[in-house]
Amino acid sequence: MTIDGGQIEVQSFLTVTLGILVLFLGKSLNQRFRVLTEYTIPEPVSGGLFIAVLIGLLHVAFGLEISFGLRARDVLLVVFFTTVGMNASFADLRRGGRALVVLLVLTIVLMLAQNALGISLARWSGLPPASGLLVGTVSLIGGHGTTIAWAPQFASQHGVNNALEIGIAAATFGLILASASGGPIARFLIRRHRLALPAGSAAVAPSPRGEVARKESGEALIRSHDFLGAVLAINICIILGSLLQGVIRDLGLFLPLFVPCLIVGILLSNLLPRKGAWLPFGWPARTPAVDLIAEISLGAFLAMSLMTIQFWTLVDLAGPLLLILFAQFLLSLLINLFLVFPLLGGTYDAAVIAAGFSGFTLGSTPTAMANMTAVTQKFGPSSKAFIVLPLVSAFFIDLLNAVLIPYFLSRV
């Protein structure tokens, strides 16, 4: 850590350490304040926002400005999505069936509406029309990574000189809205419609992110070799995913690293045999070791993402930006309540998916997963939700966004 006057720079290793502490802080806050658990606010969100607000107050009171090294956080995001791919199976795709298709179609509808709404409100507010696209799928579904990747083109070719600041601010506000709204939406639907768990879910409860089913009588044992095998398999997927990303880039299509890693994870876990003499270890798809790594990487990523929000950088952009974001929130909420939930059957699984839908359409897929995890920890498991939503939000959406962004840019 380096200190220069009021500037404090925290290196990546220390950022990870603080992120872990923030996770424990969030757990403590949720235990101490019942309202957080009642509305199923994820623990990383509770702790991360508390620290972000505290840092903001220190900035206002003493002029302190703390910047965090986030390289390790970005690696955790890739690790998490790789585990999502490793835990997906072609059989899951078949089981997703109608729900997968319905959610994908509704998400495409929302993406088109988000961009159209953002552009229209930007014109109405007197802003460059392209800036409205930055408060659409670029930042809300694409997140910080997509925003950073596209901002230079908005600035150089479409006259939005502060494109990066607008996109980052929108992605940040969206992340907060996504984190805070998913749990309450699911809670409202579950209690309003008196929803019950699907038959048989209580006896054998699959945990979030595809964990191997466990009976209530005992926990699965994770040995050191199981854990190392999972780490090795994840690393192999990431290496191959990096190579695949290069091939895709040569074809003229940009995808964040986590997308090809997700694809490689799906392919290897479904095409390789679980055991074989030619493998020095059993391929660890859908094992407790992979699920443990997924849970750790997701929690730490989200905690670090939220605790490093610099609220004071968003003040100057608050006016028209908040108007467009509020409209985007209402759009997502209406589609969620009146299309997603009923068209998915109005079941308990549909309510859990609704929590995730709010998460990734306003924030990110990790936020969606954290929202659904918090809901299922309180109300009960939903294996269908953790099969269907990641396939839509983590696999199809970035491909669609890579097509929609240039399409709308060509028309503003």
Image (cartoon, rainbow, N blue to C red):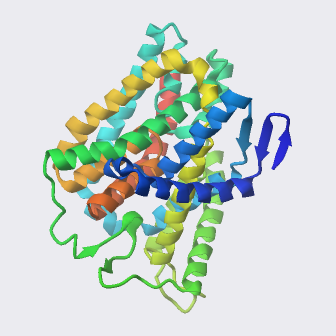
The answer to whether residue 118 is seen in the rendering is yes
Judge whether 89 appears above or below 174 on screen. below
Residue visible at 60% across and 50% down in the picture? 304
Number of numbered discs on residues = 0
The picture places residue 230, in percent across and down from the top left corner, at 56, 76
Residue visible at 50% across and 54% down in the picture? 26
Residue 218, image quadrant? bottom left
In this image, 388 relative to 195: left or right?
right
Judge whether 317 appears above or below 331 on screen. above
Residue visible at 77% across and 51% down in the picture? 11
Residue 120, image quadrant? top left
Q: Nearer the viewer, residue 254 or 282?
A: 282
Residue visible at 35% across and 37% down in the picture? 108
Q: Nearer the viewer, residue 11 or 90?
A: 11
Q: Nearer the viewer, residue 262 or 369?
A: 369
In this image, 231 relative to 393: left or right?
right
Instruction: Please identify the residue farthest to the bottom as the structure is shown.
Output: 277
The picture places residue 94, in percent across and down from the top left corner, at 28, 63
